[in-house]
Image (tube, helix red, strand yellow):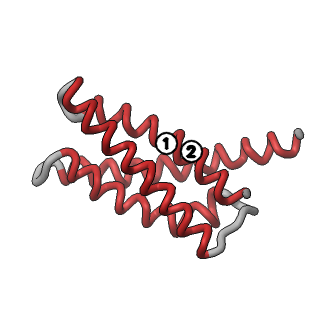
């Protein structure tokens, strides 16, 4: 049990570090794209770039010791696509409900980050 807790803790720390890098990267893309396109399109472009990052980095660097087979990398990307769809719907809703572009984005990133960690760990550790 304690080993499992330590393993989860290490995954969380690596996920946070990789997530900070990925989020900074994709947030830069999101805000850059806002100058030429709608928020939902900017979000989609940023997520596509983020999914490439996840495919190449997460199985080897974040969820170390878990499966990093091609099939699991594909499952990881597919789970990210599912979370993207949920996040895109949430962002669309929040843009209408709250207005602006920053707060809806931040809320969406927070929720999708938690979902991505849970699903990524489940995929690579099962």
- Which residue is most to the left? 36
The circle drawn on residue 113 is 1
> Quick one: 41 or 29, which is closer to the camera?
41
Mark 2, residues whose alpha carbon is within 10 Å: few (<14), some, or many (≥20)? Answer: some
Horizontal side of 32 relative to 23 (left or right) equals: left
What SS does tag 1 mark? helix
Q: How far across and down, in percent of the image, does residue 78 sit?
A: 48, 61
Q: Which comes before the other along the chain, label 1 or label 2?
A: 2
Residue at horizontal 25 percent and vertical 38 percent from the top: 92
**Vertical side of 36 occupied by 52: above or below:** below
For residue 124, side relative to residue 75 (left or right): right
Residue 34: which disc?
none
Task: Work out which quarter of the rendered image holds the C terminus and state it.
Answer: bottom right
Q: Secondary structure at mark 2?
A: helix
Query: Is 121 located above or below residue 106 in the figure?
Result: below
From the image, state whether disc 1 or disc 2 is nearer to you: 1
Residue under the image location 51 percent in, 56 percent down: 79
Q: Residue 82: give x, y in percent of width and height.
A: 44, 52
Q: Residue at x 72, y 47 (%)?
A: 10
Mark 2 sits on what residue? 16
Asked which quadrant contains residue 39, the reply is top left
Residue 111 percent across, percent down from the top left: 45, 36
| Cα–Cα span, label 1 and label 2 | 9 Å
Residue for point 37% across, 31% down: 107
């Amino acid at each position: 049990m304690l080993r499992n807790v330590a393993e989860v803790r290490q995954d969380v720390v690596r996920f946070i570090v990789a997530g900070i890098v990925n989020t900074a990267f994709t947030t830069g893309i999101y805000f850059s794209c806002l100058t030429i396109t709608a928020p939902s399109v900017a979000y989609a472009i940023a997520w596509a770039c983020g999914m490439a990052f996840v495919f190449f980095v997460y199985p080897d660097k974040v969820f170390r010791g878990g499966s990093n087979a091609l099939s699991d990398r594909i499952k990881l990307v597919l789970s990210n696509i599912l979370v993207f769809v949920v996040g895109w719907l949430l962002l669309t809703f929040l843009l209408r409900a709250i207005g602006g572009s920053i707060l809806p984005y931040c809320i969406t990133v927070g929720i999708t980050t938690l979902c991505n960690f849970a699903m990524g760990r489940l995929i690579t550790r099962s």
